Image (spheres, rainbow, N blue to C red):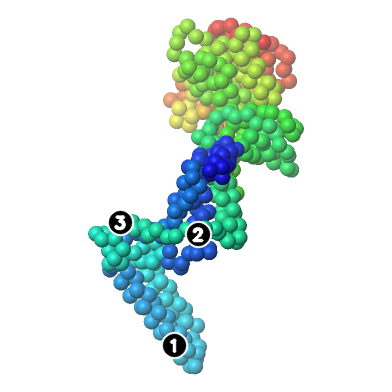
Amino acid sequence: MAKENEILQAAKQICEEKHISLESVVETIEAALAVAYRKDFGEKNENIKVDFDISTGTSKVYDVKTVVSDEKAALTEQLREERLAQEEAVQEAGKQQQKAAPDAEAQDKRKEAAAVGEGEEEKIERFNPKTEITVTDAQALKKGAKEGDEIRTKLTPPAAYGRMAAQTAKQVIIQRLREAERENIYKEFKEREGEIINGSVQRVEGRMVLIDLGQTTALLPPPEQIPGERYVPGQRYKFYVVGVNQTSKGPEIILSRAHHDMVRKLFSVEVPEIGNNAVEIKAIAREAGSRTKIAVTTSQLNIDPVGSCVGQRGSRVQTIISEIGGEKIDIIEWDEDSVKFITNALSPAKVLSVSLNEEEKTALVEVKEDQLSLAIGKAGQNVRLSAKLTGWRIDIVSDKGEKVTAHRSASERKGKTAADAETAVQPAEGQKAGEVKEQPVAEDAATDASGQPGTQGESAEAKPPETQGAPEKDTK
C-alpha cells in the first residue's frame, strides 16, 4: 500500500508543479503503459488500451476495436487486389516500353493514370484491421454485436515490463506531461489576450526582449517596444497581451508596450469611472514614447470625464504616465459635433473656424498666425495625432493665407508610420460652393500629463491662450 500511496503523491506533486489536472496525469500513465505493452507483448493488429487505477496502482489491458460492416472489409480487400493488379500492369508496360523506344510523354501519362487511381482509392473509407472488426468476427466474440459497437478484449498484463519498454514509457510520460503543460499555458494566456499582465525582463537577445511570466517566457518584439526605453534584466513592467499562437515548440506569447490599447486598459484600471462604464473612451491616438491623445465622454451630467481621468492633482494620469515611461498624455472631451471634436483635438491651439468636406472626409482648420506652429506641433505631431483621433484629414491654414498640407486620418494612413507625415507651406486654395460647411467654433482646452494644456513645437513652455469654454483641468 505504501507504493500505491507514493504513486498518488507523486501524481499530485506533478499536478501542482505543472498546473495540470490529475485526470491528465492518469491519461498520460495509461498511454505510457500501452506503449510499453505494445513494445514487449503486443501483436501487429492489436489496438492496446490500458485502464490504470492510480489509487491501487493496478492496470487492465484491452484490445479495443470498433464493429464495422462486412462489406467495408470486402471492399477494402477488392481495392487492394485491384491496386496490386494495376501496379503489375504498369510495371509490365514499363518493361515493354524500355525494350522499344522510350517515350517520356507516355511514361508521364502512365504516372498520371496511376495517381488518379490512387486519388479515387483515397476517397473510399478503408477497413483498418488494427482498430476495426467486422460484424461476423465481432459476433463470434460477443453475441448480439452490431455495427458501431465497441469490442474490448481483455489481455493479460505482464508481471513486469522489460528495461527498454520501461524506458519508452518514461519518455512517453515526460513528453505527454510537457504537452499537457503547454496546452494549459496556451489556454490560460489565450483567454487573457487584450489584457494587461505583469512580467519581468529575463534577457535581451539582440533587439528581441524575453519576458518571464512565471509559468512561461513571452516575447517583446522590436515593433512592440517603446522607442528609447531600456530593458534591464530583472526589471518588472506591465505588458499588453497582443496575441497567443500555438507552435511546434509550445505557445508563443506576444507582448507589447507600444500598443494603443495598453493606454486604454491602464485607464480602465486606474479610473473607476471608466471601469464601471460611467466614462467611456471613444478614441485613442498614440505615438509610443512621445505623446498620446485620448478622447473621453460620459452620459452622466454630474461627471466631468476629463477631470475623472486626470484625478486630483493629476494623480491618476501621472500613475499611467509613470508606467509608460513618461509619455505625455492629452485628455480631451469627445463630441458628436465633428467641428467641436476637431477643435478639441487640436488643443492647445486656438482654432478660429473649421470647414468640413463630408464627401472627402477632410477638414480645413483656420488658426491665427501665432497659433500655427502650436496647431501643427513639433514635426507635425499635434495635427497628425488629431487626424488619427478624429478620423478626419486635417489641413491647417493661418488667417494670413499660409496652409499646411493635409494630415491623413488613421484609416488613410494604414500600413504607414507616423514619420511618413510631411508638412509644407503653400497658398490656401478656395473651397467650391456646396462642398464645405464653415462655422466659427469655441475652443476647449485639452489636458496633458504635466498638468498644463499640451504644448507643441518650439513654444513648449508657452502658456496657451484662454478658452471660451470650461476652465482647463489641472493634472498636477
Classify 115 as above or below 22: below
Q: Nearer the viewer, mark 2 or mark 1?
A: 2
**Circle 2 residues within 10 Å: few <14, some 14–19, many ≥20:** few
The nearer-to-camera label among 3 and 2 is 2
Task: Name the residue: 60% across, 11% down.
Answer: 311
Q: Which residue is mark 1?
A: 92
Along the line of sight, the residue nearer the viewer: 391 or 115:
115
Q: CA distance from mark 3 to mark 2?
A: 28 Å
The single residue placed furthest to the left in the displayed view is 144
x 73%, y 32%: residue? 234
User: Which structural element holds mark 2?
Assistant: loop
Mark 2, residue position: 158
Q: Are marks 3 and 2 in contact (CB under 8 Å)?
A: no
**Hey, which quadrant is residue 270 in on the image?**
top right
Point out residue 212 in the picture as x, y percentages from the top left corner.
66, 36
Taking depth in this image into account, of 83 and 324 the one nearest to the observer is: 83
Q: Tag 1's secondary structure?
A: helix
Label located before the other in sequence (3 or 2): 3
Q: Which residue is mark 3?
A: 149
Task: Report x, y in % for residue 302.
Answer: 47, 6
- Within-10-Å neighbours for mark 1: few <14, some 14–19, many 20+: few
